[in-house]
């Protein structure tokens, strides 16, 4: 995004992020701590960048390279197996944080692109598709263009209020394309589709060009922990693209239907109708579309019959924190301002707690772990939620009881 005006093309020219220099051994000669530090710095940086309108309803295609280079064993046991494991985590996490979004998977096999799961909001189907990759023979070269074209074709159909994204996981350094890939990239840019690339080997110019043109993120991984972090950054909704429309969407809130005094009727659900290996059974209960009364086993889902988006209120609540994130904590040096972390009560001590974090609203101090936990998982400040006044009165009450 900000790279637009950057005249320097390559990472080694900018000297901007010499990650290999930042890696230092700790006193036991281990590198882990250092990589953890890099990841944490990156997390804080991303927190700082968060602002503006977000693309909350997302349609994401994940394109996975499944060719010869994915068999390389620099990630354990192989690149492909490591990628599969991380993608499973990613899918779960993605639908946990973006319940009204959809995802689809495309694999790149020797010069062809193949869809392994449709654009849908059901994590079950995706995880099954990802597990199926284990038996794939890894041969040939990938064609990035074929993969992108495939995704573009489907994403073009998605209405313009949705945020459309492509995430490419590339293990290869080459791409073998039928025509000019710049045409495809221009097409993606014109549609406002955001393309991000995670490279498992090195920086490739065409991928960098593509991510820059489409306002995506380009990342080259250091190790599996860094890979995980780079992948999971795509869980957060990205800033809305300029082409994205603001519109109101009709949604349905189905109830689990149970009529009083009657035995509930046995009905078929719509979600298992077309699957052969897990066929639909007659059952009671389930969720009914308020518009056409089709029955579904799980939410959220888009009604197959009438196209209404069906959600439950907690799904919307889970997206809420993206809109009102906890403000970033101020980083301060520890000069015994506070004895312990306000959240976890850890006693601050040198040298682990050289830096501590302060909430600007409630002015409480937190340790590094709590800073990350509050912003990543809890999404509300421990200090602000436990008002000092209430806490003081509660404590007095407790002491009072203890004395009597
Ligand atoms: Zn319906
Ligand atoms: Zn703490
Ligand atoms: Zn606070």
Image: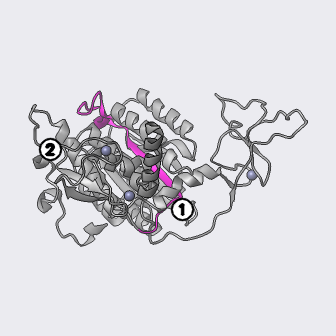
Q: Quadrant of residue 161?
A: bottom right
Q: What element does badge 1 sit on?
A: loop
Q: What element does badge 2 sit on?
A: loop
68 versus 43 height, above or below: above
332 versus 160 height, above or below: above
- Residue 350, label in figure: 2
Q: Residue 157: x, y in percent?
A: 57, 60
In the displayed structure, does residue 299 sit left or right of residue 241? right
Which stretch is magenta?
Answer: 52-79
Is residue 290 in view? yes
Looking at the picture, tell me which residue is in the foreground, 185 or 18. Answer: 18
Instruction: Report ligand 2 position as a quadrant.
Output: top left
49 versus 167 height, above or below: below
- Residue 371, label in figure: none
Position of the N terminus, as image quadrant, is bottom left
Residue drawn 54% across the image and 58% down it:
57
Chain-order first, disc 1 or disc 2: 1
Measure the alpha-carbon separation of dots 1 and 2.
48 Å
In the displayed structure, does residue 41 sit left or right of residue 244? left
Q: Is residue 65 magenta?
A: yes
Q: Which residue is mark 1?
A: 162
Q: Residue 215: x, y in percent?
A: 36, 64
In the displayed structure, does residue 401 sit left or right of residue 46? right
Decide: few, some or many residues near mark 1? Use Cα within 10 Å; few <14, some 14-19, many ≥20.
many
143 versus 129 height, above or below: below
In the displayed structure, does residue 97 sit left or right of residue 206? right
Looking at the picture, tell me which residue is in the foreground, 327 or 359. Answer: 359
Looking at the picture, tell me which residue is in the foreground, 362 or 217. Answer: 362
Residue drawn 64% across the image and 64% down it:
249
Say if disc 1 is inside 8 Å of ligand 1.
Answer: no
Say if disc 2 is inside 8 Å of ligand 2.
Answer: no
């Amino acid at each position: 995004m900000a790279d637009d005006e950057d005249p320097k093309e390559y990472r080694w020219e900018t000297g901007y992020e010499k990650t290999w220099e930042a890696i230092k051994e700790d006193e036991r000669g281990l590198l882990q701590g250092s990589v953890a530090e890099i990841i944490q710095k990156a997390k804080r940086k991303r927190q700082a960048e968060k602002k503006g309108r977000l693309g909350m309803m997302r349609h994401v295609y994940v394109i996975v390279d499944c060719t010869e280079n994915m068999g390389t064993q620099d990630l354990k046991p192989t690149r492909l197996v490591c990628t599969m494991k991380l993608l499973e985590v990613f899918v779960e996490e993605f639908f946990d944080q973006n319940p009204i979004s959809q995802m689809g998977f495309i694999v790149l096999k020797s010069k062809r692109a193949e869809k392994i799961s449709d654009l849908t909001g059901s994590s079950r189907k995706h995880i099954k598709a990802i597990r199926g990759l284990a038996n794939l023979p890894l041969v040939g070269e990938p064609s990035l263009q074929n993969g992108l074209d495939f995704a573009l074709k489907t994403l073009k159909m998605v209405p313009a209020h949705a945020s459309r994204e492509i995430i490419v996981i590339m293990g290869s350094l080459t791409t073998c394309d039928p025509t000019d890939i710049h045409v495809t990239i221009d097409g993606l840019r014109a549609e406002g589709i955001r393309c991000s690339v995670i490279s498992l080997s090195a920086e490739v110019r065409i991928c960098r060009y593509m991510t820059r043109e489409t306002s995506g993120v380009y990342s080259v991984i250091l190790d599996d922990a860094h890979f995980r972090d780079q992948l999971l950054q795509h869980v957060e909704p990205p800033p809305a693209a300029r082409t994205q429309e603001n519109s109101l969407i009709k949604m349905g809130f189905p109830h689990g239907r149970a009529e009083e005094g009657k035995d509930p009727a046995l009905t078929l659900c719509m979600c298992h109708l077309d699957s052969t290996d897990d066929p639909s059974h007659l059952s009671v209960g389930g969720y009914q579309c308020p518009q056409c009364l089709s029955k579904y086993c799980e939410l959220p889902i888009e009604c197959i019959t009438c196209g209404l988006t069906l959600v439950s209120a907690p799904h919307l609540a889970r997206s809420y924190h993206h809109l009102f994130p906890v403000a970033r904590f101020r980083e301060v040096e520890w000069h015994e301002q506070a004895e312990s972390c306000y959240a976890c009560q850890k006693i601050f001590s040198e040298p682990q707690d050289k830096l501590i974090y302060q909430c600007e609203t409630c002015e409480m101090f937190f340790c590094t772990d709590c800073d990350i936990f509050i912003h990543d998982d809890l999404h509300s400040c421990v200090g602000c939620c436990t008002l000092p006044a209430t806490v003081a009165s509660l404590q007095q009450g407790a002491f009072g009881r203890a004395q009597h």
